[in-house]
Image: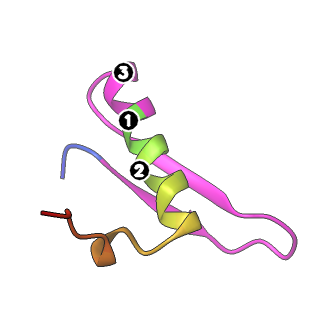
Amino acid sequence: MDRGFTFHDHPADITIECWAPSLIKAFAEAAKATFEVILDTSSVKPQE
């Protein structure tokens, strides 16, 4: 896998580890991970 993110257990906070082939893409993965903390992004469907 060339890019992605994972969460790590922490008693008080959430830690996110992101990886990608470039810094810009790593920041994009960090943004995805942040939204995943807020809500289950797989449950979001586009409105018609």
Q: Nearer the viewer, mark 2 or mark 3?
A: 2
Residue 34 in picture, x, y percent from top left: 54, 53
Q: In the image, is residue 7 above or below residue 35?
A: below
**Quadrant hosting residue 44:** bottom left
- Do callouts 1 and 2 mark residues in contact (Cβ within 8 Å)? yes
Which residue is located at x 67 percent, y 58 percent?
A: 15
**Which residue appears farthest toward the right when viewing the image?**
12
Label 3 CA crowd tier, 10 Å (few <14, some 14–19, many 20+): few
Please give the label number shown on residue 32: 2
Query: Which residue shows up at 12% across the image and 63% down it?
Result: 48
Q: Is residue 41 left or right of residue 10?
A: left
Q: Secondary structure at mark 1?
A: helix
Amino acid under label 1?
Ala
- Residue 18 position within the rendered picture, expressed as x and y whole percent measured from the top left: 45, 45
Tell me if residue 5 comes above or below residue 39 in the rendering: above
Name the residue located 57 percent from the left edge and 65 percent from the top edge. Answer: 37
Q: Is residue 14 above or below residue 4?
A: below
Q: Which residues are magenta?
A: 4-27
Residue visible at 48% across and 43% down? 30
Any mark on residue 24, and which?
3
Secondary structure of the residue carrying numbered label 3? helix
Given the current orientation, which residue lies at the most extreme left position? Answer: 48
The stretch drawn in magenta includes residue 19: yes
Q: Position of residue 33 (x, y in %)?
A: 47, 55
Q: Marks 1 and 3: CB-CB under 8 Å?
A: yes
Give the crowd class for mark 2: few <14, some 14-19, many >=20 residues within 10 Å.
some
In depth, the one of 35 and 22 nearer the eye is 35
Looking at numbered disc 2 in the image, what kind of residue is underneath it?
A: Lys
Q: CA distance from mark 2 to mark 3?
A: 13 Å
The disc placed on residue 28 is: 1
